[in-house]
């Protein structure tokens, strides 16, 4: 008997397995058996245009509950309208994908709407029951009429939705929508390219996904709830009508380009927020190591906080920023952080070590003359693309690779100066328009070091007119640096490093150390004489000896300023000799002044921060000596 029982049980299980695979048709709908008393819709008659799905259906004497619409069940069908009963809890992926559906009625009971379930239809109105908890990715993606224009103009999400998937309402035609309090997350690109003008977000929302409201160009009003914790990358990108954004207390994460190229003029930070701080209208992380975002209008100039290490991608993308002063500590510029802004002035020589400049950082800006820092080893993809005002670019030896689109459409470019004898490598590209120089001015002159023309001509650099030239002699650094404090017992010893090998032309230069002001009657001199020697082929050592041939020293006064003036012509090279060099120690006034001078004194000499004399003020910090003896640091 025990054996017979086992045989009977096995037969029953086998029969149930067959039943689970059974499909049958009732009316115009095909069903698939999914359980002992449940079925899901799995197909429809091609002739059907309007159906009402029954809550139950009978087949061979068995009554089944219709609790699901299967994956792709009515995909590409001719249905124009459907009524879904309350018995249906699940609508699976692509259930009505690309059908002719223009009207759908949901029964109270639907909980789950799968990916692409109602994608690419012609719905004009949507009212979800309160039972709906999950809206899948692209669930109502791209509703359009016969002219392929967005047509979903009315949306009621009900009161129960917890999750709205990625691109769920892509190209939504509605001008307003309310996200219920039950919703915790709005998926990435959820409302991309929608016509929304106002959005109501209720308390309970925790995350706005990447690009959720990207390119909602009519969106003018949105208030972020206090429960919000995360704002995704490009969440409000290109939202030109949006004029204000608030950062609630609970927000700990903000993605790149969150409000880039929008109309935001005001960023309001909840005082209770501990993750971010405001400085001069610009948002930083709490420790001020990252510049997170800036208003797109109203901020035309900004001085980066001294503790900042990086500017987040898209922070000033599309903004009215015209000039920015970078600090010494800055190491990174994020993706497109200045793209399409009004930027025309930036001190790339300000930071000690910018080691990363991301793609498209300066694309479509107003920069005219740029000298790149040598610390990043490559010119990134699209870094200066469409900079139609750019006329001059200097590429230092440290940059060894040039990526696609780097100088695309730089139509005003007149000169490029490459300081390396080895041509920077042009990285692989696929089409002509991907070439780094595509549609830039092919008549521009490419200046290269003497002896390297043939090496450049053998590469894609031959796009330009190549001319060899001797490098201009420039001061790279001094030791001590101008602006440093003198040591208590300061030696008469000063080093000047140039950008190329030099030779000594004056073995006993007439070096002057003025006390108080340049031209002062109070001067300091070593006991014996000044000497000029070379530490290496690029570094000049100017030193004063005592009577025993050792380096002499003087006792400094912390209240006084010392001006070390190394005359012109001490060293020479192929490009010529050095101009006058000034090193300022224990500066009496370290503040940076404006370009204007209140006195009637005239400018007698201008020096860069390295102490090299210049013919005129350059962008950045200048040290200016006036006829009345005063010396000021001037920011241009």
Image: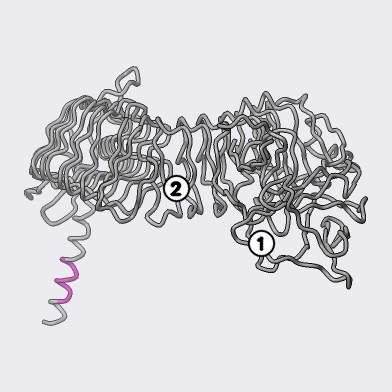
* Label 2 CA crowd tier, 10 Å (few <14, some 14–19, many 20+): many
Q: Position of residue 381 (x, y in %)?
A: 61, 41
Mark earlier in primary sequence (1, 2): 2
Q: In the image, residue 1 lies at what x, y percent?
A: 11, 82
Which range of residues does the magenta coloring cover? 6-12
Q: Is residue 589 above or below residue 29?
A: below
Residue 244 left/right relative to 292: left
At x 61% / y 35%, what residue is drawn? Answer: 384
Across and down, in percent, residue 541 comes to 83, 60
From the image, state whether disc 1 or disc 2 is nearer to you: 1
Between 421 and 116, which is closer to the camera in this rendering?
421
Question: Whole-Å distance between the Cαs marked 1 and 2?
Answer: 34 Å
Residue 268 % position (x, y): 29, 41
Q: Is residue 8 magenta?
A: yes
The residue that mark 2 highlights is 291
Colour mapping used in the image: one colour
Q: Secondary structure at mark 1?
A: loop
Q: Is residue 97 above or below residue 610?
A: above
Residue at coordinates 7% horizontally, 50% vertically from top-left?
62
Residue 156, picture quadrant: top left
Residue located beneath label 1 in the image:
486
Q: What kind of secondary structure does the magenta stretch mostly adopt?
A: helix
Within-10-Å neighbours for mark 1: few <14, some 14–19, many 20+? many
Q: Residue at the front extreme?
A: 521
Q: Residue at x 58, y 46 (%)?
A: 357
Q: Secondary structure at mark 2?
A: strand
Front residue of 175/536: it is 536
């Amino acid at each position: 008997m025990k054996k017979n029982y086992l045989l009977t049980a096995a037969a029953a299980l086998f029969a149930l397995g067959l039943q689970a695979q059974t499909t049958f048709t009732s009316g115009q709908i095909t069903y698939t058996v999914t359980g002992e008393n449940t079925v899901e819709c799995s197909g429809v008659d091609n002739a059907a245009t309007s159906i009402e799905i029954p809550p139950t259906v009978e087949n061979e004497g068995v009554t089944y509950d219709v609790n699901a619409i299967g994956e792709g069940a009515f995909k590409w069908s001719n249905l124009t309208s459907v009524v879904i009963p309350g018995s249906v809890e699940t609508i699976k992926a692509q259930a009505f994908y690309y059908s002719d559906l223009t009207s759908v009625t949901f029964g109270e009971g639907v909980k789950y709407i799968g990916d692409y379930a109602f994608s690419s239809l012609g719905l004009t109105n949507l009212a979800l029951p309160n039972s709906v908890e999950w809206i899948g990715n692209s669930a109502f993606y791209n509703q359009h009429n016969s002219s392929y224009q967005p047509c979903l103009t009315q949306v009621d999400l009900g009161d129960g939705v917890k999750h709205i998937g990625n691109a769920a309402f892509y190209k939504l035609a509605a001008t307003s929508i309310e996200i219920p309090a039950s919703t915790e997350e709005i998926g990435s690109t959820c409302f991309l390219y929608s016509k929304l003008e106002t959005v109501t977000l209720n308390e309970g929302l925790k995350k706005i996904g990447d690009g959720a409201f990207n390119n909602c160009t009519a969106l003018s009003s949105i208030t972020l709830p206090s429960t919000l914790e995360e704002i995704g990358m490009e969440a409000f990108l290109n939202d030109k009508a949006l004029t204000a954004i608030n950062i609630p207390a609970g927000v700990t994460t903000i993605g790149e380009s969150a409000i880039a190229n929008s109309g935001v003029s005001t960023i309001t930070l909840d005082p209770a927020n501990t993750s971010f701080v405001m400085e001069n209208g610009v948002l930083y992380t709490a420790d001020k190591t990252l510049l997170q975002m800036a208003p797109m209008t109203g901020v035309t100039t900004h001085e980066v906080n001294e503790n900042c290490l990086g500017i987040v991608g898209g922070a000033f993308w599309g903004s009215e920023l015209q000039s920015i002063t970078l600090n010494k500590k800055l190491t990174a510029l994020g993706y497109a952080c200045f793209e399409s802004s009004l930027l025309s002035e930036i001190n790339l020589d300000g930071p000690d070590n910018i080691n990363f400049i991301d793609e498209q950082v300066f694309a479509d800006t107003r920069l005219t003359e740029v000298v790149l820092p040598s610390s990043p080893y490559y010119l990134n993809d699209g870094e200066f693309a469409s900079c139609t005002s750019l006329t001059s670019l200097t590429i230092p030896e440290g940059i060894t690779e040039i990526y696609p689109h780097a100088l695309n459409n730089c139509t005003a470019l007149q000169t490029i100066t490459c300081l390396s004898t080895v041509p920077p490598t042009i990285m692989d590209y696929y089409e002509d328009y991907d070439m780094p120089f595509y549609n830039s001015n092919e008549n521009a002159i490419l200046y290269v070091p003497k002896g390297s023309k043939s090496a450049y001509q053998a590469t894609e650099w031959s796009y330009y007119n190549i001319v060899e030239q001797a490098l201009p002699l420039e001061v790279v650094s001094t030791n001590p640096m101008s602006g440093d404090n003198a040591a208590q017992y300061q030696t008469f010893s000063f080093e000047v490093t140039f950008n190329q090998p030099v030779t000594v032309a004056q073995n006993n230069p007439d070096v002057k150390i003025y006390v108080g002001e340049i031209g002062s009657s109070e001067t300091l001199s070593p006991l014996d004489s000044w000497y000029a020697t070379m530490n290496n082929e690029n570094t000049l050592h100017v030193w004063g000896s005592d009577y025993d041939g050792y380096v002499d020293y003087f006792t400094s006064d912390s209240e006084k300023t010392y001006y070390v003036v190394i005359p012109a012509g001490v060293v020479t090279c192929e490009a010529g000799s050095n101009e006058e060099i000034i090193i300022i120690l224990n500066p009496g006034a370290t503040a940076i002044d404006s370009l204007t001078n209140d006195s009637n004194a005239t400018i007698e000499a201008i020096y860069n921060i390295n102490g090299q004399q210049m013919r005129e003020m350059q962008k950045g910090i200048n040290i200016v000596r006036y006829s009345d003896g005063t010396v000021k640091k001037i920011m241009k």
